Image (cartoon, rainbow, N blue to C red):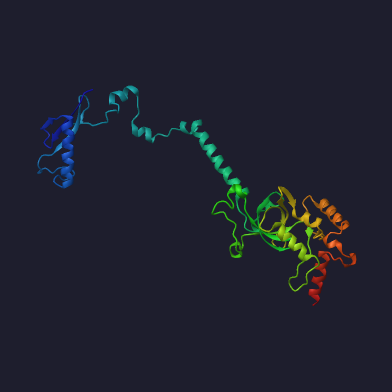
Amino acid sequence: MAYEFCIKHNRPTESAMIPLGTLCQLSAVICKETAKGMIPPGPAPRDHPPLVTVALRSNNLPGQNGLPAMRWPWSPTSEERDEKKIPPLADVLSETHWSHYRDPRNIVPVVVLTGLTLSIAALYRSYLRRIPQAINIEPRYWRRRSLFGRVTSVGDADNFRLFHTPGGRLAGWEILPWRKVPKTSKELKEKTVHIRLAGIDAPELAHFGKPAQLFSKEAFDFLNSYILHRRVRAYVYRRDQYDRAVATVYVRKWLLRRDVGLQMLKRGLATVYEAKSGAEFGKLEERYRSTEKWAKLKKKGMWSGNKRDYESPRNYKTRTGQATQSA
């Protein structure tokens, strides 16, 4: 098919053939003059001097108003479209091709991406979401999950505060700048989980006007030096009446995992918890009781004195509580 460029005046009877190079130069002149304002944009008025228009003349494409219809050189002609039965572009765009939605090449990536997104969300919710306080622990966590974090303070000989760092260093805690454990009490306010050691009862320190119990300072000093500012893992069982998470706590010492409560029993700095109800041991009650018997035989800590002078933490709380009420 032969094509030729031509120019056409606004008088439909006058047209002339020009070479392609001349056409490019003429287009540049027209653009420059239009930019200067010498040739107004838009269609020329009837009384305006003759302007030129550019058209693509085809030997077999009909035109309008004496000008040929213009198309892209690589687009098919009407005859080629009829031979190949190519539908018009407007019909192709408006038609819904359901075969695309059934094509495995389209379905598989969508299913994989959706499944991956849901899996990441579930992983974050179950293992990487930080728990600020014991009241924020969901019911599904009790007896099924553990909390890993750093001990920020020790309040008594059998409880402490834990800053939850889910995932530990693998999740960037204490490595990335925005994942640091706060240092000041103001920064830590309402951001720590209050932990109560499960299965043991330690001597009471002096507070609320009550005198300190024997070996309470020794028990507090041991717990403070054993876990303060260290990373521990707490297996939580339930929440007590003081909004503390009752848990068995482990800390690593010389690459070995140590049960904190068991270590206190072994040193005679705590007794097995003897409450009538609400005692939590996990699956360690027998081991705790056998360790307490061993400490008694070896006269460790609280068991080193005269048996007549011994007072368990449970009896001490009962006595001082009754004395406070009577006063």
Q: Quick check: 127 left or right of 222?
A: left
Q: Quadrant of the C terminus?
A: bottom right
Classify 34 as above or below 224: above
Residue occupying the point 12% across, 30% down: 16
Residue 226 appears in the picture as rendered: yes
x, y percent for residue 177: 54, 54
Q: Is residue 136 above or below residue 21?
A: below
Question: Which of the image's four quarters has the N terminus?
Answer: top left
Height in image: 141 above or below 74? below
Residue in the picture at 71% in, 59% down = 225
Residue 50 coordinates in the image, percent (x, y): 10, 39
Residue at image x 30%, y 23%?
80
Q: Is residue 222 left or right of residue 128?
A: right
Q: Is residue 280 something one can see in this rendering? A: no
Front residue of 254 and 153 = 254
Residue 155 at what x, y percent from top left? 70, 64
Could you say which quadrant of the image residue 201 lies in?
Answer: bottom right
- How far across and how far down the image is residue 222, in percent? 75, 60
